[in-house]
Amino acid sequence: MSEVKIFRVSGRIAKPNWKTNFEKELRAVKPEDAVETVYKEMGSKHRAKRFEIKIDSVVEIKPEEIKDPVLKKFAMRET
């Protein structure tokens, strides 16, 4: 069975009238799954198309490095 890991995905959204950077922490089995989730969430929340979302890095992080308080509490309870 696969182990769920925590990934930090950072990148930017470049729409014609709006540009912003983002950093998102997610639980996923593989880095590809984390990127797919970012595309889904950013597309839904900000109406951004996949070609408008640029992923700069996907890094696996340890539970101690998590910044999101909800995700941190959830991850610490698992270990």
Image (cartoon, rainbow, N blue to C red):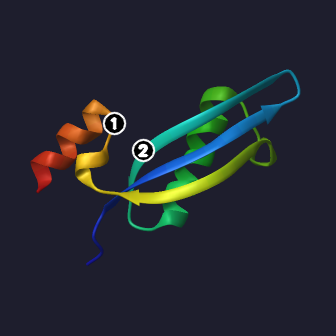
Q: Position of residue 20 (x, y in %)?
A: 69, 28
SS of the residue at dot 1?
loop
Q: Quadrant of the N terminus?
A: bottom left
Asked which quadrant contains residue 44, the reply is top right
Give the camera-side residue of 3 and 22.
22
The amino acid type found where label 2 is placed reads: Glu
In the rendered image of this protein, does residue 33 appear above or below residue 39? Answer: below
SS of the residue at dot 2?
strand
Q: Earlier in the sequence, mark 2 or mark 1?
A: 2
Residue positioned 45% across, 68% down in the render: 30
Q: Is residue 54 left or right of residue 4?
A: right
Residue positioned 14% across, 47% down in the render: 76
Q: Quadrant of the C terminus?
A: bottom left
Q: CA distance from mark 2 to mark 1?
A: 8 Å
Give the camera-side residue of 36 and 9.
9
- Disc marking residue 67: 1
Residue sticking out furthest to the front: 65
What is the tally of numbered marks visible in this picture?
A: 2
Tell whether label 1 touches label 2 (CB within 8 Å). yes
Q: Residues within 10 Å of mark 2 (few under 14, many from 20)?
A: many
Q: Nearer the viewer, mark 2 or mark 1?
A: 1
Q: Position of residue 36 (x, y in %)?
A: 58, 55
**Residue tagged 2:** 25
Q: Position of residue 6 (x, y in %)?
A: 35, 55
Q: Position of residue 14 (x, y in %)?
A: 79, 35
Give the camera-side residue of 20 and 30.
20
The amino acid type found where label 1 is placed reads: Lys
In the rendered image of this protein, does residue 39 appear above or below residue 5? Answer: above
Residue positioned 11% across, 47% down in the render: 77
- Disc marking residue 38: none
Q: Is residue 28 left or right of residue 73?
A: right
